[in-house]
Amino acid sequence: MSSMVENCPISKHFGAAAKSYDRQPGVQSRVAHRLATRISKGGKAVSNVLEVGCGTGFLTAHLCRFFPDTPIVAVDIAGGMLDRVRTRLPQQKNLQLIRADICELEMTGMFSLIASSSALHWMMPLDNTLRLLSSFLHPGGRLSFAMMVRGTLAELHALREEVAPQKPYVRFLPTTSAVFGLMRCAGFTVEDWTLESSSVRYNSAFGFMKSLKRQGVTGGFVSPDNMLTRGEIRKLAEKYRRRFPTGDGGIRASYKVLYADAVLGKKA
């Protein structure tokens, strides 16, 4: 295992969050279920599967159920996440788990299906990631994914900008149109897609921010030099409570999830 993977900030964040990840009231489990349902209705023969960014195995479990005799390779950069998959699926004979940055994999033209749930938005720059995934597929192979796009956590982002305008985000989620443009450049033809907007209730703004930390969602959009102070966090939490209540004492957080099914190459 390379020290690069061990020392990667995202690997550290998600590895530390592995034990608490499944218990958080986020959208990942629901997104994985909906993506799996889309994949199961695809109707195309699948000879083998690569799952990119498997996390604790929400989607992996569905894939193993749908394709019990098909070789499945699940990759994640965080070793702690893979340990949770092993606990979730201890007897799965057709499943191979690999800890790696996908950029380090050498799997040219190996797979008929690549699947990814709630992971591609972490794999920036996205154009490089999509080109790499296209190289992993057979000609005519399929890519099915769900990823967060611009508009996710809009409330938090707006309030953070109000509270600490001197501490801007270092990157943003891509828009849906930007994702489609990058897919075309990588050689994919999108055959079906859905953009889903939803909200999740949290007991409080502090609880919400703790939940994000427990899911490993820290450090991806801000640099170590512009983290919020305790005072700024308190101010943000109070604004959140007043501006985005649920009506029953909680607060809401919005998510925008893009589901897409694409084929490598042009339609016949």
Image (spheres, rainbow, N blue to C red):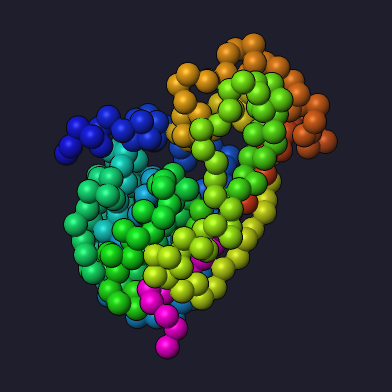
Tell which residue pokes out farthest to the bottom in this image. Answer: 268
- Image coordinates of residue 259 in percent, x first then y, are 54, 62
Tell which residue pokes out farthest to the left in this image. Answer: 1
Along the viewing direction, whichever of 192 and 177 lies nearer the viewer: 177
> Residue shown at 80%/31% (left/top)?
243
Establish if 119 lies above or below 160: below
> Residue shown at 31%/33% (left/top)?
8
Classify residue 48 as left or right of residue 18: left
- Image coordinates of residue 203 in percent, x first then y, are 68, 30
In terms of secondary structure, what is the magenta stretch mainly? strand
- Image coordinates of residue 145 in percent, x first then y, are 46, 61
Establish if 242 lies above or below 92: above
Magenta span contains residue 22: no
The magenta region covers 257-268
Establish if 20 lies above or below 235: below
**From where the camera sits, is residue 10 visible?**
yes
Along the viewing direction, whichever of 166 and 248 lies nearer the viewer: 166
> Residue shown at 25%/45% (left/top)?
100
Classify residue 231 as left or right of residue 187: right
